[in-house]
Amino acid sequence: MEMFWFIILVFMLGMYVVLDGYDFGAGIVHLLFAKTDEERAAIRNAIGPFWDANEVWLIASGGVLFFAFPTLYASAFSGFYLPLMLVLWFLIFRAVGLELRGQIHNKLWERFWEKAFGMASLFLAIFFGAALGNVVRGVNLGMVENGVSTQEPHYFFLQLWNPTLDPMSDVHGIIDWFTILLGIVSVFTLTIHGANWIILKTSTGLNQRLKGIIFKLNIGLAFLVVLTAGLWQYVKPFPLNNLIGHAWLWIFPVIAGVGLIGQFWIKKFKKDGMGFLFSTLFILGSFATTVASLFPNVLPSTNSVNPSLTVYNVAGHEYGLSVGLNWFVIAFLLVVIYFIIQFRVFKGKLDDVGYH
């Protein structure tokens, strides 16, 4: 049952990154590339009917984590307490930025909340990328000092940064040069993804310019991916051992590679949805590659005193996991029905939705 719930958790997190990821990307495009009120309105129209529903996947992921892997939930939510609070505030500002902007028709008011929406989207992309970097790098489980564990084996706490910003330091921080790099990769990835969604759901003059922006950003993303892959070998030696030992797992980096390479043809696509398809493939392929390379670890330990948290040593009781399966099937069917209805109601272009 542990493996079933692990796959469900990874699936939900992947859905969240793909669906709410284009919201973050659209917010970054709104902040950095939209030049006129018409262009900014088109971006808000593209995500307006979807953004709050997309966040359900994050809540559902947290629920599954709490239910199926309580030890991991307790460890991560205490250890990552500071960045989680920042993420919470950025999520709030992104939401109120969208909702409050149209409440008062005053230029100063509208610009303030537009900036709040854009900046919150940008920082969320950075922090979620940095969060992935922290998991890849590992944490000091048990808060080991001088070879002695000072806390329970699953406990840790990270400050925002250490003085050296070195991921190999004995004292880890949320922010170091490796996690910052993953944050930048996340910004490039989600900006491209959000721009592709805008192209898919609107018909404004912004779209043609976005294709050129996507092409340029993809060049930078390709460079960052190669750089990150190389530095990963330094931060975590032999990170691809799982893939080497199980050849079928190479399907995930291949999917990511297809998605990345496909973006270079963005200017030639005749169907607006092709760009979004390729950016989705890159996100899912990259995420799955990372998960496969870490498995069975879900939170690696950087010391030799306390073992890493794995799928098997953080899972809940077998009976509870079995009972939860019945409720999951019902909930999943309801979610599927909801999203089918939503996408049927808001299919096609959304230029005239009028989301303010």
Image (cartoon, rainbow, N blue to C red):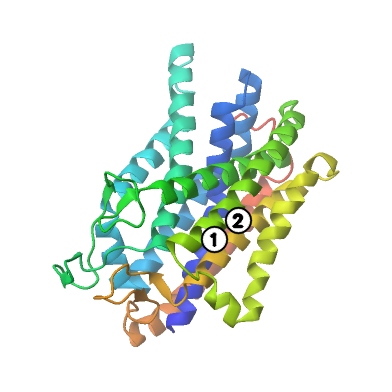
Q: Regarding mark 2 in the picture, which secondary structure is present there?
A: helix
Q: Regarding mark 1 in the picture, which secondary structure is present there?
A: helix
Image-based side of 293 in relation to 112, left or right: right
The C terminus, quarter of image: top right
Measured from the top left, where is residue 208 in percent x and y?
77, 31
Residue corresponding to mark 2: 283
Of mark 1 and mark 2, the one earlier in the sequence is 1
Q: Residues within 10 Å of mark 1 (few under 14, many from 20)?
A: many
Measured from the top left, where is residue 345 in percent x and y?
67, 47
Residue corresponding to mark 1: 14
Q: Quadrant of residue 156?
A: bottom left
Q: Is residue 356 visible?
A: no
Image-based side of 154 in relation to 98, left or right: left
Please give the name of the residue rendered at 49% of the width and 23% of the height, measured from the top-left corner: 102
Image-based side of 196 in relation to 6, left or right: right
Please give the name of the residue rendered at 43% of the width and 38% of the height, measured from the top-left corner: 123
Front residue of this view, candidates 201 and 189: 189
Q: Residues within 10 Å of mark 2 (few under 14, many from 20)?
A: many
| Amino acid at dot 2 | Ile
Please give the name of the residue rendered at 38% of the width and 76% of the height, measured from the top-left corner: 310
Numbered circle sitting on residue 102: none
Tag 1–tag 2 contact (CB < 8 Å): yes
Image-based side of 312 in relation to 99, left or right: left
Measured from the top left, where is residue 193 in percent x and y?
63, 45
Q: Compared to 25, does 303 lie above or below?
A: below
Q: Is residue 216 visible?
A: yes
